């Protein structure tokens, strides 16, 4: 996989806390953070969309509660 396959999220600001995404085909999405580039999460567009909808709706807020 070449480095040009990865795109920096537009929501990532300057600095070291950046999210990168790669979609090598229509069925796979890969995610990685700039501070751990060798750790890659793989998902599908459907699963990622469901996660984003849940986060926006606040259904995951309890996960960050102490």
Image (spheres, rainbow, N blue to C red):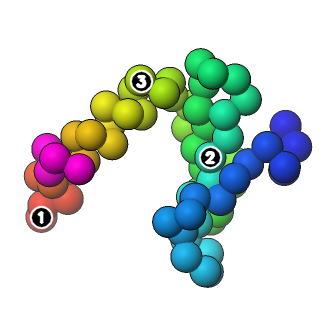
- Which stretch appears magenta? 56-60
Give SS at disc 2: strand
Give SS at disc 1: loop
Could you tell me if the residues under marks 2 and 3 are in contact, i.e. CB atoms within 8 Å?
A: no
Residue 55 versus residue 29 in the image, above or below: below
Give SS at disc 3: helix
The CA distance from mark 3 to mark 1 is 30 Å
Residue drawn at (88%, 43%) of the image: 2
Residue 36 appears anywhere in the view: no
Which dot marks residue 14? none
Query: Residue 40: horizontal and vertical position, in percent?
Result: 62, 41
Could you tell me if the residues under marks 2 and 1 are in contact, i.e. CB atoms within 8 Å?
A: no
Residue drawn at (61%, 80%) of the image: 14
Query: Residue 1: horizontal and vertical position, in percent?
Result: 85, 37
**Magenta span contains residue 59:** yes
Q: Which residue is mark 3?
A: 46
Query: Residue 4: horizontal and vertical position, in percent?
Result: 84, 49
**Magenta span contains residue 34:** no
Residue drawn at (32%, 37%) of the image: 51
Other-residue count near label 3 (Cα within 10 Å), few / some / many at <14 / 14–19 / ≥20: few
Of the image marks 2 and 1, the number of the one nearer the N terminus: 2
Q: Main secondary structure of the magenta part?
A: loop
The CA distance from mark 2 to mark 3 is 15 Å
Q: Which residue is mark 1?
A: 66
Quarter location, residue 8:
bottom right
Q: Which residue is mark 2?
A: 21
The CA distance from mark 2 to mark 1 is 29 Å
Residue 60 versus residue 29 in the image, above or below: below
């Amino acid at each position: 996989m070449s480095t040009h396959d990865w795109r920096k999220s537009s929501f990532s600001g300057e600095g070291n806390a950046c999210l990168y995404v790669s979609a090598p085909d229509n069925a796979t999405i890969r995610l990685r953070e700039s501070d751990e580039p060798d750790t890659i999460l793989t998902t599908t567009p459907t699963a990622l969309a469901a996660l984003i909808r849940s986060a926006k709706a606040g259904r995951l807020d309890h996960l960050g509660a102490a």
